[in-house]
Every structure is written in structure tokens, then in C-alpha cells.
Amino acid sequence: MHQVFAAARVWQLEHIDRLPNHAKVTAHRIFGVERWRKILASCESHKFKNLEDGRDNLLQLCYETLQTSGFKDSPTDETRTLANMELASIVYVDEQIYKMENWPIYVANKKDPKSLVGIEQHFDVVLEYDDALCIRYIGTIDGLVLNRNRGDRLTLDENKTANRIGDGWQLSFDMSNQITGYCGASTTVFGFPVFHSRVTGLKIKPTNRGEDCVPIEPVSRNAESIRLWGGWVRHTVQEYERYVGGYENAPRYTHSCMRYFRPCALLSFCADTPEGRSEQFDQMVPADLSPSERAVQDV
């Protein structure tokens, strides 16, 4: 779905923001030349006269992005399926397309298509503390946009997918460490302070009950919140380093066993005996790298 979000932003960059050369360079960076050519070839009409035609064009772009993503349905997961993602794409496009003019994509230089664009920007930064401790921090910024209703205020544009988007889920972003950290990292990536964000939550399996796509704006941070976030990062890393070689001695925070409204994937591991955990641990295999890790693994 994050590939769909990126494709929608590229489409906006070309057709709403009127920067086709920037869109082409950005699409090739994210999807590669051949895949983007294939995606565009599937669209019935690359040119259109109005936003109503554009909706169909953009939806076709989203469908083809999904079909070329390499994703396959799993027999054990009835929620994250291509069919549900296509339905979610319809909801997302209908929510976003008529707002795009009010949220143009950030472009560092409109005359240079190779300049920095606020779509799918990976970051690889180092947090340096007063005592010279350094911690590497990586991630991916979904988007950076300008808020026309707030004097073109620069705003992170984050996408989240979820099974439930209730009040508790929405309020979590008031304190979300990810949003805080991304505001800090964006200051390094783009070269200016970024203290505001817009978060768009999307249900992967739409229910047509009025909360399938929920925009949360503004989500704001300040220098103090970033300073406190830096302390949390340090504490978390030091806890990891303290117990990474001896997980049996690590404290158990059982309130996390059902976090995000579902059982933790390691629940059966933690509930086992020490001998059973050792046996399970020996059978574990390395997890696939995240997109952010893949982007910086050779750096």
C-alpha cells in the first residue's frame, strides 16, 4: 500500500502540481524505469480533461502498482489481500484527489527535475549526544507537502494502514515517537525545521462505516518534544544492548502482549519454558529487511 501512496503522489506531482519532469524522475527513482513504463502502459488514458477522468486514471495507476508489486495473498490472512487493497485504494483516492490542490508536494527547485522532492525519501542520520554517544537512525518519509490553508506550512504527510481506526488509534499520534522522530530527521534531510505533520489512516479492509480513511491534522511537535524523544531513543537502545546477549534476563512488559489489538507474534515463544525458548530460538531465521533497511544497507 505504501507503493500505492507513492504512486498517487507521483500522479499528483504531474497532473495537479504540473511538474511532469519531476514526476518522471521521482517515479523512476522509486519504481525503476521498466516497472513505471509497465504501470503507465496499463492506464487507459494518460491524459484527461478533468478530475473526474483523473479519478479513473489514478485508480488504474493504483491497481497496476499493486499488481506489479510482487505481493501474493496468504491463505492465513484474510485481511491483507489484493482484493481488499484495491478496495482500500478506491477509498484513498476518493478521499485525497479533491484535496490535492490544497496540499502540493514539496519540491526544492521547480526548474530542476533532479532536485529533492517530498516523496518516499529514505533517511540515514546519526543522533549525537552531549557525551559523544552516537546512534544511527533510519526510516522513510512518505511525503512532505505544503499546507495551503496555513500559509504553505511545510508538513510531513504520513500514511498508516490499520484494521481499526478508532478514537484511541487517532489520539495515539498526539504522542507518537515515530512522528516526533520523523520531524527531527526531516530537518536533516530537507535542511529546514519541520514541526507539523498530517497522518492519513486507511483501513486495509474497508467497512463503509465512515471511518475507512481518516485524516488527522495537524499533528504538531516542538523542540522540547524532539529533545524528550532523543532521550527515549537512547534509553531504548541501551535496554536492547543490555539484554541482547541474554534475553532470559530481560524484564517482561506484558502489557505489550496484546498491543495493536492483536496478540504479539512472539507470545508462544515468551510463554514457553527456558528450554523451549532455547529450542525455538535456534530454529529462528533472519527476518526480511524493511524497505528502509534495504535502502541504506550498502551505506
Image (cartoon, rainbow, N blue to C red):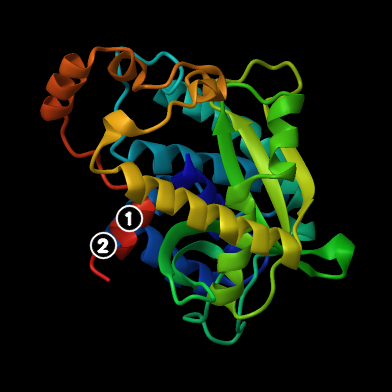
Q: Residue at x 62, y 56 (%)?
A: 229
Work out whether 135 lies above or below 283.
below
Work out whether 213 lies above or below 233.
above
Disc 2 secondary structure class: loop
Q: Residue at x 53, y 77 (%)?
A: 116
Dividing the picture into quadrants, the one containing residue 64 is: top left
Residue type at tag 1:
Glu
Q: In which quadrant is the C terminus drawn? A: bottom left
Label 1 crowd bin: few (<14), some (14–19), many (20+), radius 10 Å: some
Dividing the picture into quadrants, the one containing residue 33 is: bottom left
Work out whether 245 lies above or below 257.
below
Q: Which residue is mark 2?
A: 297
What is the x, y in percent for residue 175? 70, 45
Q: Is residue 77 visible?
A: yes
What is the x, y in percent for residue 203? 59, 27
Residue found at the far bottom of this picture: 111
Residue type at tag 2:
Gln
Q: Is residue 101 left or right of residue 23?
A: right
Q: Which residue is mark 1?
A: 293
What is the x, y in percent for residue 163? 57, 22
Residue nearest the viewer, comparing 250 with 298: 250
Disc 1 secondary structure class: helix
Q: Residue at x 71, y 58 (%)?
A: 225
Q: Is residue 156 left or right of residue 171?
A: left
Residue found at the far front of this picture: 249
Q: Residue at x 28, y 38 (%)?
A: 70
Q: Which mark is residue 236?
A: none
Q: Is residue 45 left or right of residue 270?
A: right
Contact flag, marks 2 and 1 (Cβ < 8 Å): yes
Work out whether 116 lies above or below 262.
below
Q: Is residue 144 visible?
A: no
What is the x, y in percent for residue 289? 28, 47
